[in-house]
Image (cartoon, rainbow, N blue to C red):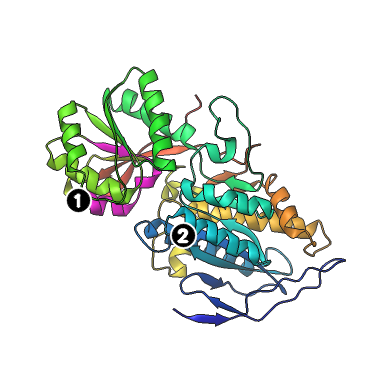
């Protein structure tokens, strides 16, 4: 782990000048980024994601993609007088760590926006901390509808935090999208539903189940698993005895991979399908050879197939990052770029300088951000949700995820 001494940068800004001071010494490890040349004022974009642990493949892809956005903005001198840097903190997928990271990022006055987190449960612990500080947060991966539309989102939508935005679509769309694919396209009529009891997994399983039943499908059984274990033999036996022709899993790939493998080993030769939380190459590694035919839905269209993403894919490769950008790379870049666009608007509206209330102004500007991003058109509705609601079904074929069908669900 390396230590980086940063020069304290004081910017004379507007009347009542704002002082932006980067930490005198930052324990950065694999977290921070000095991102090329730029102007005299440094703006930090925070990143919160699991950088170690079971979900680190997704988290490191998020960090690297935001880093690339910062470097690109500096290279282009996109915001005159501003140099962007990132400060990435590890939450290990734990809400308590996420809340601590949020407090730390709020304390650094040079942080004007944060990208993350990966997990909806972590987001729940961070939202109020950021909102109280008027610090904008843009998640590339959170999909639980309650984060933007309130706990009663199914009957009465109400936005709880105006500083929270996301570039990924929600499980109010993702769950039903999977249900329609399974029932109408894959002709699966009898499902066994499993979830990990966490905010993301349980919520996704619920929206899927409701829609599958509406379509006329049968729920052969349901179970909750303990995400801290890897022995799913008991639930695998229940799946086999249920007569289900498919398993829907609400959760993430560290559990989904072994679960799929054990279900097949128990004698149930049926596919497992999950949401974006299982869409990772690591799922296939964990599930083994019997993963062929398993399915996942994920946000957006395949990045590799989007004309708008060609430059991102090429630049990511040439930047030499050791980890893949994974499922949320394009959305992470766009989340970072949304913050950069908001900063640009605030600076331009204040005669080329950051105002004394920069955080509040950036949060306000985010609501009207609109640009053509890596993942397509990037903008936000009245709840802070992405207006791009496209999703894709992927299947495991020849040891890799391959896109099967892209589209959206409008209800």
Question: Residue at label 1?
Answer: 288
Q: Tell me whether the residue at label 1 lies in contact with that at label 2, contact meaning CB atoms closer than 8 angstroms.
A: no
Residue situated in front as seen by the camera: 134 or 132: 132
Position of residue 142 in the picture relative to residue 198 (left or right): right
Q: Answer whether residue 90 is visible to the viewer in this image.
A: yes
Q: Secondary structure at mark 1?
A: loop
Q: Where's residue 137, x and y in %?
A: 60, 52
**Few, some or many C-alpha atoms within 10 Å of disc 1 (few <14, some 14-19, many ≥20)?**
some
Q: Secondary structure at mark 2?
A: loop
Which corner quadrant holds the N terminus? bottom left
Position of residue 200 in the picture relative to residue 48 (left or right): left
Please provide the residue range marked out in magenta. Answer: 271-288
Position of residue 207 in the picture relative to residue 114 (left or right): left
> Which label is found at residue 91?
2
Dot placed on the residue nearer the N-terminal end, 1 or 2: 2
Measured Cα–Cα span from mark 1 to mark 2: 28 Å
Q: Where's residue 273, x and y in %?
A: 30, 37
Q: Where's residue 231, x and y in %?
A: 20, 48
Q: Answer whether residue 373 is visible to the viewer in this image.
A: no
Q: Within the magenta stretch, is there residue 410?
A: no
Q: Within the magenta stretch, is there residue 274?
A: yes
Residue situated in front as seen by the camera: 386 or 206: 206
Residue situated furthest right in the rendering? 15
């Amino acid at each position: 782990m390396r230590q980086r001494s940063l020069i304290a940068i004081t910017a004379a800004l507007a009347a009542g000048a704002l002082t932006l001071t980067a930490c005198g010494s930052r324990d950065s490890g694999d977290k921070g980024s000095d991102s090329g040349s730029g102007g005299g004022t440094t703006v930090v974009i925070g990143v919160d994601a699991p950088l170690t642990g079971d979900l680190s493949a997704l988290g490191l892809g998020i960090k690297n993609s935001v880093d690339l956005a910062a470097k690109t903005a500096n290279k282009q001198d996109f915001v005159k007088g501003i140099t962007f840097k990132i400060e990435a903190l590890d939450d290990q997928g734990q809400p308590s760590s996420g809340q601590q990271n949020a407090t730390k990022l709020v304390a650094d006055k040079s942080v004007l926006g944060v990208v993350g987190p990966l997990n909806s449960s972590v987001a729940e612990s961070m939202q109020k901390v950021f909102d109280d500080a008027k610090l904008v947060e843009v998640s590339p991966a959170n999909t639980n509808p309650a984060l933007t539309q309130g706990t009663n989102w199914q009957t009465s939508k109400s936005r709880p935090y105006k500083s929270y935005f996301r570039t990924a679509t929600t499980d109010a769309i993702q769950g039903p999208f999977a249900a329609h694919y399974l029932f109408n396209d894959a002709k699966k009529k009898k499902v066994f539903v499993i979830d990990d009891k966490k905010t993301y997994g349980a919520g996704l399983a619920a929206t899927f189940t409701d829609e599958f039943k509406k379509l006329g499908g049968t729920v052969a059984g349901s179970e909750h698993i303990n995400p801290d274990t890897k022995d799913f033999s008991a639930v695998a036996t229940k799946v086999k005895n249920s007569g289900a022709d498919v398993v829907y899993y609400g959760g993430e790939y560290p559990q989904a991979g072994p679960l799929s493998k054990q279900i097949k080993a128990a004698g149930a030769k049926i596919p497992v399908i999950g949401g974006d939380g299982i869409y990772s190459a690591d799922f296939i590694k964990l599930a083994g050879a019997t993963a062929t035919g398993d399915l996942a839905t994920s946000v957006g269209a395949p990045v590799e197939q989007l004309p708008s993403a060609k430059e991102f894919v090429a630049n990511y490769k040439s930047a030499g990052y050791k980890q893949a950008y994974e499922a949320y790379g394009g959305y992470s870049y766009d989340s970072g770029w949304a913050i950069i666009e908001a900063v640009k608007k605030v600076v331009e509206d204040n005669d080329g300088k950051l105002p004394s209330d920069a955080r509040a102004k950036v949060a306000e500007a985010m609501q009207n951000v609109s640009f053509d991003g890596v993942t397509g058109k990037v903008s936000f509705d009245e709840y802070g949700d992405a207006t791009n609601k496209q999703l894709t079904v992927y299947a495991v074929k020849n040891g890799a995820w391959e896109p099967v069908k892209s589209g959206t669900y409008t209800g």
